[in-house]
Image (cartoon, rainbow, N blue to C red):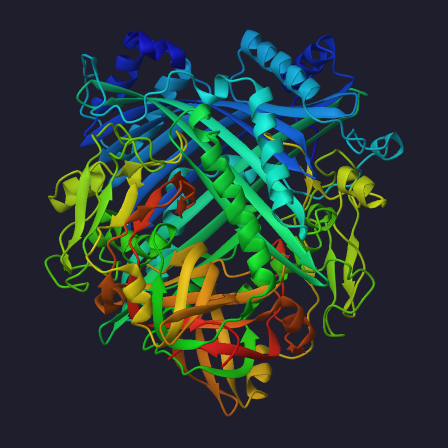
Amino acid sequence: MSGEAQAPGPRRWLELMLDEASRHGATAADAMFVEGSSTEVRVRLGETEQVKQSRDKGVGLRVFVGDRSATTSSSDLDEARLRALVERTCAAAKVIAADPFAGLPDEALAGEAPGGDLDLYDPALAELGVEQAIDRAREAEDAARQSDARVTNSEGAEMSWGTSELHMLDSRGHYRNRRSGAVSISVTPVAEADGQMQRDHWYSHARHLADLEGAREVGLEAARRTLRRLGARKPSTCQVPVIFEAPVASRLLGSIASAVNGASIYRKSSWLQGAMGTRIAAPEVSIVDDPRIVRGAGSRTFDGEGLATRRREIVTEGVLQSWLLDSYTARKLGLTTTRHARRGLGGSPSPGSTNFLMANGEQSLAELVGATRRGLLVTELFGFGVNGVTGDYSQGAAGIWIEDGELTWPVHELTIASTLQAMWLAIDGIAADRHPGRSCSAPSFRVGSMTVAGS
Amino acid sequence: MDALARFGVDEPLVAKALGEILGHEVDDADLYFEHVTSEGLALEEGQVKKAARSVHQGVGVRAVAGDRTGYAHSDAIDGPRLVDAARAARAISRDRSGGQVVALGSHAASHDLYPVARQAVDEGLEDKLALLEAMDARARAHDPRIEQVFANVACELRHVAVVRADGRVVFDERPLVRLNISCIAVEGQNRQVGSAGGGGRFDFETLAREDEWASLVDEAARRAVLNLSAVDSPAGEMDVVLGPGWPGILLHEAIGHGLEGDFNRKGTSAFSGLLGKQVASPLVTVVDDGTLPGRRGSLNVDDEGNPTRRTVLIEDGILRGYMQDRLNARLMGMEVTGNGRRESYASVPMPRMTNTFMLAGEDDPEDIIRSVKRGIYAVAFGGGQVDITSGKFVFSGSEAWLIEDGRVTVPVKGATFIGNGPDVLTRVSAVGHDLQLDRGVGTCGKDGQSVPVGVGMPTIRIDRLTVGGVST
């Protein structure tokens, strides 16, 4: 949050909805108003391909009639139609099942001021012009295309930026607001050699324009990642150590974020069911969720229920310490909310991670590769082969083969398989290369053994 | 033209906004108005504890000059916003000074594929609650090991109006309903999940037909229990038999995306330049057909106002055609095929699939299984993904079996299949006579936009596909 967002326009809509809900029998309610604008430009082969400008505004409402609740959202801010929608929502709440765990967050927590300034809003983003952005995107794509003759084509370079304002008000009078922004640049080059075509991409994302990586650096990294895939072949089926490069290690970290989500836990549908307080990963693995990083991609001073956020240890030296909870899931599990509610306009709050970070190790990725006699460095994962209930894991992958501690030839058309339980416990090397600008971020790490399926 | 009133605009205002764009040097332009009502109810722990309803509306304004697209959208639809959006969109082109006056004319959509008397979003909640509760009860009665049941019903009604550069205005009213169920079966420490879903562009009564929902429940519950006894999947290349229906996701991933016009115009698809060439076994014919009544992937008109149709993609193994929107068809000098789709008014149209399926062959499905010495028989899948440029695709099985000496023996878990789009269909060695379309659950993602789609396939045999399991 940075400064006060402009009231009272949004507040008027919030009050109108809460009043209307109360008139139709709601005993409690909370409402939100979101307004934002964003721009996206795309350059391909040096020419402007697309310019897109967005303006969005919408309201969301959750009503409680005793311990029954229903939600609604609308982008149609016609007063009469909105009142009718609120009435319909109250009627819906009356017919669905009572749920003793439903309700606004505990008053003692709700009264606590979020405090702090995480510097999530950059006024420079409102000033950024389309032409400037096109120039940056072009510079990024040019850098990729000119870096090597084998970069023969491109899916383009994109720059997008936007700002938004959020206002929340509940029927007890707690009001919260924030303004935030984000900007990103990405490049997707296509390279060709010996009849094989490959693409990859790279991007940078930041809250402040000044923190965005240079366009040229992003383009060069995208080209490097694309070029190293050329000449890929299919490996033989075998069992070897697998190193996950930081970007794909972060996806694996995401599987922990989902598994510790309180909604999966009370539904008994997580592979970490019953694992609280036990070893779920190698002792070198520590994970925190930290919503209070200044200018952090996933930062926020208050959560989706308006509660002041807190840093939380999730895994410490391999031992599971905490679920991610909102008020509802906490009550279901007989615990206290960790203030991790997320809420979109359209539905009820549900827990979610903010900046979900795995601690760095002490070596470089090169050292990790050097210490691997024969194995696989995974640089891309794709598909939907992760079973969140059982932990069974079988994903499509591409990467680089390791022989005698050296990166040799690229490989693709392969899968890697194991179970999430076994993989996290089998981590036997962690690099110190976590990307600082991402909201779910892990350093590169090695898993002792997995099944690689190829020919 | 009175139908424009639904979107809060009238004919003179729309004509003025269009004129703002056409006063510039553009090759194409359109205004896309949308009003969506959606409703979702979810059951867990035996009760429906959540109900959500939303109304979303907005307009997207597009100007196209050469291969440049200007797009502006707003969820507030009033005179000043609409004209602002038109001016923002046309910024990619040069002024040719002097406004253009366009006369608007209403045109009927080319098909009437989903006539519905009472829309599901207008039905009361009571019947929907009762349906979810009946599903829960049936799933729990299926087997005492079913411990958790999650079911939801989702209904949507989308009104669209496409105003095209030639003044043609096309309206469409699109219902979309869907039921989903997941069951978790537990035996000791072993927890397994089974899911099923179905739906389409029809009314709630059709969705709530007992034979329909009961078979979905039985499928999900049976699958959860079955997975309790599933063994680890083998890893490596082997012969694979895909069952009919939803396994058609293979076509969607392995070849469908690669045959979308945009990737081929840009030369970034593994299929670029292969038109007229052999890309599949002569047994294989694949079509994309947006005109199947009531299907999830069907449309009366696409999101650019073009009539949908049946397009032959592969005929007897030869690559015959791409799926096109207006921009890519124009730049490639090809026909528009009614595949210009967008997620919402906030999205730029792209070539997308509708219902993509392989036509039936002549083999008996039983014979196809009997022909395999050792391999995998896969009948249900989670999801899939493709890298358009390298052609590599992957899809993950949610129900698969081992085939040993021509017989289906034990269930396997966690099987993922990976292959190369341009050659996987060349290794199709048998095509069954049992073509089925999926039950209406597919959602396709591309460039951040999701749209509903359908797939279908008869039983087929693929020689040597890489199976990604754990046991070597």
Percent position (x, y) of residue B228? 61, 62
Give me the residue at 67% from left, 68% from top. Answer: A421
Would residue A145 be found to the left or right of residue B188 on screen?
left
Up-down relation of residue B332 to residue B19 (above or below)? below
Residue A109, quarter of the rendered image: top right
Counting every numbered tag in the picture gives 0
Would residue B287 be found to the left or right of residue B62 on screen?
left
Up-down relation of residue A64 to residue A101 (above or below)? above
Residue B77, quarter of the rendered image: top left
The residue nearer to you, when weighing A49 against A345, is A345
Percent position (x, y) of residue B281? 18, 65
Which image quarter is the N terminus of chain B in?
A: top left
Percent position (x, y) of residue A24? 70, 10
Residue B454 visible in the current orientation: yes
Give me the residue at 70% from left, 18% from top. Answer: A94
The residue nearer to you, when weighing B26 against B224, is B224
Percent position (x, y) of residue A194? 23, 76
The residue nearer to you, when weighing A387 against A61, is A387
Residue A122 visible in the current orientation: no
Up-down relation of residue A61 to residue B236 (above or below)? above
Would residue A154 be found to the left or right of residue A257 on screen?
left
Residue B34, quarter of the rendered image: top left
Most extreme residue toward the bottom, as rendered?
A404
